Image (cartoon, rainbow, N blue to C red):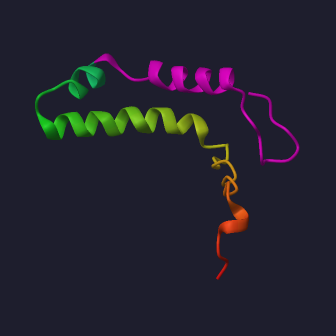
Amino acid sequence: MPESDAPFPEVLTRDQLRFEIKFGLQQVGKCVIRDWASSNREKAEQARGAVIDSVLVRFDKLQVRAPAPAEPIFRDKVKSS
């Protein structure tokens, strides 16, 4: 991933996001995937956490933000406080 002069915000395309998630999932060992499918609830939750952490580490250098909230359709009818 190319680094820019400014650390934030770097906007990822859908393909870049897909790549980062796929790469993170590929780093997970088969035994973790097997544990995730386990009927042992505690073991499955630990494995799920490991998978999530594996994907999230790919985004450590990025700032994740939600899109701006949508404006109300009937803005003129919304009472302001």
Residue 81 position (above or below residue 15): below
Quadrant assignment, res 76: bottom right
Residue 1 location in percent, x, y? 73, 27
Left or right relative to 53: residue 66: right
Does 8 sit left or right of 38 as displayed? right
Query: How many numbered marks does the figure carry?
Result: 0
Asked if residue 15 lies in the magenta stretch, the reply is yes
Q: Is residue 20 above or below residue 49?
A: above
| Residue 45 image-quadrant placement | top left
Determine the image quadrant of residue 29.
top left
Rendered view: 43 above or below 64? above
Q: Measured from the top left, where is residue 46 in percent x and y?
A: 26, 39
Coordinates of residue 4 in the picture (x, y in percent): 85, 38
Question: What x and y, as percent, mark residue 77?
Answer: 67, 67
- 26 vs 60, left or right, is left
| Left or right position of 79 against 22 | right
Residue at figure coordinates x 67%, y 48% from the top left: 67
Which residue in the rendered view is the most extreme toward the right?
5
* Quadrant holding the C terminus: bottom right
- The residue depicted at 51 percent of the width and 38 percent of the height is 56
Magenta residues span 1-30
User: Furthest-left residue in view?
Assistant: 40
Residue appearing at x 63%, y 27% in the figure: 17
Q: Nearer the viewer, residue 20 or 81?
A: 81
Magenta region includes residue 40: no
Q: Residue at x 16, y 41 (%)?
A: 42
